[in-house]
Structures are given as structure tokens and as C-alpha cells.
Image (spheres, coloured by chain):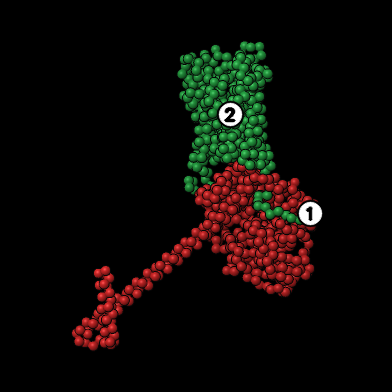
Chain colours: A green, B red
Amino acid sequence: MSLPQLSSPHSHRPLGTAQVMQTVILACIPGLLAISYFFGWGTLINILWLGLLALALEALVLRLRKRAIRVYLTDYSALVTAVLLGLSLPPTAPWWLGLIGIAFAIVIAKHLYGGLGYNPFNPAMVAYVVLLISFPLEMSTWLSPRGVASLSPQVPGFLDSLHAIFSFGDKASAIDAYIGATPLDEFKQQRGGMLVSEFWNQNPLFGRWSGRGWEWVNLGFLAGGLFLLYRKIISWHIPFSLLAVMLILSALFYDNGSSTSHGSPLLHLLGGATMLGAFFIATDPVSAATTPRGKLLYGALIGGLVYVIRIWGNYPDAMAFAVLLGNFSAPLIDYYTQPRTFGHQSGK
Amino acid sequence: MSASVIPARTARAIGSFPGGIHPAENKTQSLTRPIQSAPLPETLIIPLTQPGYQQAELLVKVGDHVLKGQPLARGRHGIGVVTHASSSGVVSAISEQAVPNASGLPELAVVISTDGRDQWLPHTGISDFQSVDRDVLLSRITEAGISGLGGAGFPTHIKLRNQHSLIKTLVINACECEPFITADDILMQERAPDIIQGIKILLYLLQPQQCLIGIEDNKPLARAALEKAIDDERIQVVSVPTKYPSGAEKQLIQLLTGLEIPSGTLPAKSGVLCQNVGTAYAIARAIDHGEALISRITTFTGAALNRPGNLEVLIGTPMEALLDACDLDRSQLSRLIMGGSLMGISMTALNLPLLKISNCVIATTAQEIPLPQAALACIRCGMCAEACPVSLLPQQLYWFARSKEHEKATRHNLFDCIECGACAYVCPSHIPLVQYYRAAKAEIRDEQDKHRRGEHSQQRFEFHQQRLEREKAKEEKRRQERAELARRNREAKAAGKPTAGQPDDIQATLERVRAKKAKAKELEENS
């Protein structure tokens, strides 16, 4: 009988990287359901399309890098990137947009930097920013949520969505009828000196607390995020400080809904990509700060940047930019926020 | 206010430590039956291991007949541990033997063929320890060969000596926080009065202001037994939450007192001394009965044993017979671990001898403790940092260890790592973090050693240079003295006086040499 000589610890928590990634994907479901309810099948189709591409590209690159394909493919990290990018793209994003995006994410942002664990930037957000800068029109073409369009089916059907994504050059697609601005964009561009309440009442894009439909999408991601917290997949630090800073800034500049108000805290917290970003994107461990205090700072930085760019920048939403800028600062933040080791004086 | 009849003995922990983990406890399996006595083995293998890899001084030779409790060897310079024969018999060999240790290297051991009589060396206890001088008690503890029974095995007498006035708090470690181990638990349940007696001896020796027994809240029976046995108001039981590693010395002190022992210092420097319950028990046996430490309670557990339980075993018993006493299923056995599942060490053979530090033997199956999975890339999830009880950044240390950035690793306090394994336990990528830290620590120590050796030879070189210069200076001085003498002689000669002790011909020779030198110098200057 041969007994192995192994180093302690001998037992291990039954939770691996694959389960972590699977849980993240699972936690996206409430948000995805809300998106699908309000904007049709497009996002789901995109996610499946991107997932397929991501796995194929990952396998290809792993082969080129002479890595064990099965081992790394089954860590589900490529799928998480696909899901996050798919959730961020407009539901009508054409197939080639997704292809370029996911190729950029997997091949360049992830593997050229050394693969999982080594990439300094969030691959999905790198891809998103590349697409946003390169194809602004396609990237800002959103649909009106259910309840706004006066058409008989209030959201595009499965075939319409499929056609919109894979219509090889057919411009006159049925989807055009559903196209509309996002609430954050509308609020920024179209208010023209009205009081917030006035504008709110006359514009069908706004719902109870934030953009119609968007508020539920955000609540969906909030629910998923709380699930991740409960399962201890993510820690509370980044979402907490990110949302707290956004709350503080938006409350500070709310100005009681005057004609120069920048919108209520709820508009910002439940609008755009706030909850998706706070719980699913900024918390991407590979590219985020890792010390407890560092995470707080990192989340606060992203929250602040999102608000600043939303209000005073050129873009209606800014999660991707903010996260990438946060990624840049993460090593520096980590360096200056080392926790005090047991038995040491504070500082060094 | 009405005074309560029974004082509430158990206090709650006042401190807490960061991180920690909650692994499956796996303690119930071995707690189904009381302490069993183990069968007397035919052979005992008693390692003479000393702290710091010192050589032990042998007290017996091959062929000697020894009695149970007879000293076999002792450490030199009074800092080692005395080892004893744990049963009577004949010394059949003194040679290097395989023992359970992390290095896998054999160690010098005395092998005894037992005679089956289990005959004690005559010994007497001290009936009233308070009537005896402390030094007498301390030397009794030394002679009994007591070392820490919690796992680290540090010689107890060294810990107890020369610190009387310093210690304010005596901490008794009854946490037993590692999975699978129940030896202390059952010892407390069955032999609490002896433990309390040992604690009272420690109180007498150290004269602290208080004594806190830290026990995890998953041992209510043991706690109740202790509370029942306590008859000294200085002793208090403190319940701490079940969280690994609450039984690590500095973590337990933090839990019980709120004190954070500064890095790199011993708790004694902060007025705290920690002893394990098993050690307290051994002290009571040594003082009250004069018994040397020749046996201990060891947990035999794991799914490959059909009858797990706690055995009272003789130190040096080969484990195979003990495992068989617990009905080992060899076909199921995948790994053998001495200690707990988080800090224990692998054993590669069944028949290694049981040591004083052997608190637990886990004979496990591939289902119960699966073999380690292949490590994946670190995803920097930070679960390790959340689990670390000393607030290190395990993943940063991992990067530094991998890239051999030893200076950075040291600056990130690698040497504060207590190797508890919490980080590696939670790592979703199954990275053997502790292994990396051990390797890095060893490399750094090695480097420092080399550096020290380098400095040493540099110093020697410098001393050598200095000596050469000194000699040169001395030579120069002597030359000048000679020249001075010669000059004076010359003057004396010129004055027509006879020179003292300098015959004329010598003087003449000197003159000639000087003239020659001057000429040579002239030539040199001209050239």
C-alpha cells in the first residue's frame, strides 16, 4: 500500500472556481428575466450567441497556448464574460458587434494578458468600451420598454429579435419600430429646463422610481447581487461603497427636483447599468482591488466616476469607463491599503 | 440583591480575531465511546527528538533492561526534553528510525522489546505541592519529560522557568479547534479533576492574577465537566465561538483577553502564558503521582476505521496495531494523517511510532478527504484574505512567493503566517498556498543564512587586512627604533665615547648598509 506524502491543509472547502462562476451566471437570471420582459428576446439571444463564441474562442486560444483545454474551459470564466457582455449590449446588437466584442474580450483583454487571473482589465468592459467607441450608433440603439411603444405587441417577438441580430444587411427590419432612447439619455438631453416632476409626468419613459423597465432590471440585478453576497461569492465592500457614493452624490445634486436638478438618487441607483455594475462587474475579482479597505476605495472611485461622467460627461451612462479607470488604479490602491497584520503597529 | 448560590462560571469571549473558517467538524465519530486503553505493543520505538535538532544525551545502551518510566535520554544544556521508556523491556536497538515528521527524515530512536510485565520504575508523588519549593516542582516537570501536548511539543519546563513575576494571565487552551480531533474533549469529559489539579500547580508556579480556560462552544460536556471540577476562584472557563483557528495561541489570547501579542514576541512578554489542557493533565500526573509522560490520549478517526475512538496509548507504540484495534479497513485507506485535517502531517507508512505530540491519527478514505485537485489560476477573489486570522494578504504573498520576490514577501509579513491553512482551505482555485509560503520562508531563511555567512567571511577578511596592517605598522615602528638607536650610537661614537653593546664592526656594517640604501634611493629618485 502506498500512502501519499501531502502538505497540509488536507481538507478543502467544496467550492471551486467553476462553482463560483456558475453561481455568478445563476445570479444574473433575475436581471435577465427583467430585461427580457421589458425588451424582448434580444439579450438572451445575444448571450447565447456570445457564449458560443466565447467557448470556441477560449478553446482556440487555449489550443494555441498549448494549455489543457478541458481544464480551463470548464472553469466557466469565458461564459461569465459572455454573459456580462451580452447583458450590457443593446438587445438589438447585430451578430458582428457581439463577435468583435467577445473576440476582443477573450483573445486580447484576457488571453494576451496571460489568461484568467492575469488580466488587469475586466474583459467584458474592455470589449464594451471598444464597441462603444468604434460603433457608437449600434451601441446606443436601445428599444423602448414594454408599456411605452404603442404597437400591438409591446416588445419584439423572438423572430423579430433573431432577425434584428442576424439580419444580414437587411436594414428595414421590424425592430426599427421599437427603437427609442434610454431614460438616462432622455433625462440628460431632452429635459430643457423643466422641473423633474413635470418632465417625469409627461414622458412615458419614466416609471415609478427610475426609467420604466430599467428600474425592474436594476432590482433584478440587485436581487442577484444580494444572492451572491449571501453565498459569499462577493464581499459587500465594493457594491456598498459604489452605491453609497452614487447615493450621496445624486442626493447632493438632486436640488429638490428643480429645473437644474441632475435627477433623483433613485433615478441613478435604479437606472442604467448601476446594479449590474455594482454587483457583477465592479466586483470582478481579477481586475478589482483586493484588500478590504482597498475594495471600499475602489468601489467609491467607480461610483463617483459613474456619476460624474453621467452628469458632466458625454455619455449617458458610464459603468464601463468607470470600471476600467478603477482597474487602472487597483494595484496602486492595493499597495496603499494593506491591512494591518496581526501583532503589528498600524502603518508599517 | 440576592447572591446566586452557584456562581456563573462560564464567561463569553471578550475579544475576536479576524477571518477564520468553519470546516466540517467531524468530531462526533470518535466520541461515541469512552477512552479505551490500547494493547501493549511488542516493540516500542521512542524517538529522542530534541528541539532545534540538538543531539540527545543517551542514558541507556543496547541490551539494557529498562523499566516503565525510566529515562532513556535527555537534552543537553538543560533545554531539551527527557524521554522515557513507556513500558518495561530490553533496549534492542538505538538507531535511526522513520518517525512521523514533515521532513520525512529518520530520527534517532531507542527501540525497546517489551517484556509484557509493564513494570514501573518506583516513583512517588508529592502529596501537597504547595509545601514544596517551586524549583523542586519545576525540576519534577523537567524530569517527567513534559512537552506541550497541543501539537507543537515545546518543552514545558522552559516555558515555565524564569517568568514567575511576569505572568498576569494563565491561558489554558481547551479549544481543540481542528477538525477530527477529540482527544482533549474526551480528556476533559473524563478526567477534569486532574486537569484542574494541573492548573492549580501552574497557578502556584506562575502566580498569575487569573486563569482563563478557553473552550470552543461545541464542547458543552467537557465544559460542564470542567465547571464541576473547578474549586479555585482564580480559574474561569471562557466559551469561545467555534471557529478555526481559535486554538492558535495568539488567536486564543486575543479571544480571551482582547490582547494582541506583538509580532515576533512571545506571549510571556505581554504577561500571558498558554498551556494546553493535556499538558496540565500531564503536570498533575507528574507532581501528584511522580509519573513521567509515557502515555497520552490520541484520537483515532477517519472513515477507514470501523471503530473510531480515543485510545490511551504509550508513547512510541507503532500505529499499525492501534489502527487495527480500531478496525482499520486497509482497502479503503487512502491517506494517513497525524494531527488534524488542516495542520496535520502525512504519514507514508502504517507502523510509524506515536509521539508525544500525536493528538490525532486520521485514517481517511478518498471520499472523506479527496485527494487535492489540480491548482487553477488565482482569480484574486480574496477569499483567502477574508479567511486569514492574522490579516495577511495571502494572494499577494502567493504572487511574491511564486516570483521569488522575497523582499516584498517579507514586507508583506510572510513571517507572521501561522500556516493554519485557512487560506488554502477556501481557495476556489485549489492553490496549495501554505506550501508556497513554507517554501518561500525556507528560501528566505536560507538566503539570510548565506548572507550571514557572507558577512562573516567579509568580516574575517577585514580582520585579516587589519592584522596585516597592524603588523606592518609594528615592523615600521621597530625599524624606526633601530634607526634611532643607531643614530644615538653614531653620535656617541662621534663624541668619542664607547658605544653600549654595539661593537664597532656592527656599527660599521650598519653604516655601510645605510650608505648603500641612500645610494639606491638616489638612483631611484634620479631615474
- Is disc 2 in the same subunit as disc 1? no
Q: Between label 2 and label 1, give the one nearer the viewer.
A: 2
What amino acid does circle 1 point to?
Arg
Which residue is depicted at the point 44% across and 66% down? B461
- Residue count near mark 1 (Cα–Cα under 10 Å), binned few <14, some 14–19, many ≥20: some
State the quadrant of the C terminus of chain B.
Answer: bottom left
Q: Is residue A168 above or below residue B319?
A: above
Tell me which corner region of the image, top left, top right, bottom left or bottom right, holds residue B172. bottom right
Amino acid type at image mark 2? Gly
Q: Residue B235 at x, y = what percent?
A: 62, 54
Q: What is the spatial separation of the Cα atoms under label 2 and label 1, in whole angstroms?
A: 56 Å
Q: Is residue B369 above or below residue B53?
A: above
10 Å crowding of disc 2: few (<14), some (14-19), many (20+) = many
* Residue drawn at 64 percent across, 45 percent down: B375
For the image, the number of numbered tags is: 2
Q: Residue furthest left?
A: B495
Residue B277, position in %: x, y? 66, 56
Chain under callout 1: B
- The residue labelled by disc 2 is A101
Residue visible at 75% across and 49% down in the picture:
B365
Q: Is residue A177 above or below residue B184?
A: above
**Which quarter of the figure is the N terminus of chain B placed in?**
top right
- Determine if residue B252 is in view: no
Nearest the eye: B159 or B200: B159
Relative placement, left or right, of A302 versus A22 is left
Chain on which label 2 sits: A
Asked whether, in this view, residue B466 is left or right of residue B525, the answer is right
The image's mark for residue B330 is 1
| x then y, percent, for residue B81 | 63, 65
